[in-house]
Image (cartoon, rainbow, N blue to C red):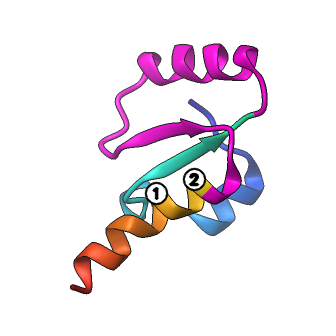
Amino acid sequence: MTHSASARKVFPDPSSVSRMALLGSSPVDRVVAMFRLTLLPTGFPIRYFTSEDKAMEWLLEEANDSHA
């Protein structure tokens, strides 16, 4: 899986990523995302969402759990 130059600036080291949310809007987006996810192991959880709010809630869940 490749990442854009912008993503590499934000996350230059893959170990700094603890989880990743993929955001799409159609069933085709989901199929493409699920296909790509099976190609490479990531070492961190990745989930697909159609709702930005749900994606952010899931992304922040781990941060909130670690501060409890």
Residue 42 shown in magenta: yes
Position of residue 63 in the picture relative to residue 1 (left or right):
left
Q: Which amino acid does the dot numbered 1 rest on?
A: Trp
Q: Quadrant of the C terminus?
A: bottom left
Disc 2 secondary structure class = helix
Q: Point out the residue furthest to the bottom here.
A: 67
Task: Please tell me which residue lies in front, 63 or 50.
Answer: 50
Q: Quadrant of the N terminus?
A: top right
Residue to which mark 2 is pinned: 55
Neighbor class of circle 2 (other Cα within 10 Å; few <14, some 14-19, many 20+) is some
Residues at discs 2 and 1 in contact (Cβ within 8 Å): yes
**Residue 17 image position (x, y, % from top left):** 43, 59
Task: Please tell me which residue lies in front, 13 or 29.
Answer: 29
Vertically, is 11 above or below 4? below
Q: What distance separates the C-alpha of mark 2 from that of mark 1?
A: 5 Å
Q: Which amino acid does the dot numbered 2 rest on?
A: Ala
Vertically, is 23 above or below 52? above
The part of the image, by quadrant, that contains residue 56 is bottom right
Magenta part of the chain: 25-53
Which residue is at 30% across, 42% downward?
A: 43
Neighbor class of circle 1 (other Cα within 10 Å; few <14, some 14-19, many 20+) is some
**Label of residue 58 in the image:** 1
Vertically, is 30 above or below 63? above
Residue 9 shown in magenta: no
**Residue 45 image position (x, y, % from top left):** 36, 43
Which residue is at 67% across, 65% downward?
A: 9
Vertically, is 42 above or below 52? above
The part of the image, by quadrant, that contains residue 36 is top right
Disc 1 secondary structure class = helix
Which residue is at 46% across, 57% downward?
A: 58
**Label of residue 28 in the image:** none
Position of residue 48 in the picture relative to residue 19 (left or right):
right
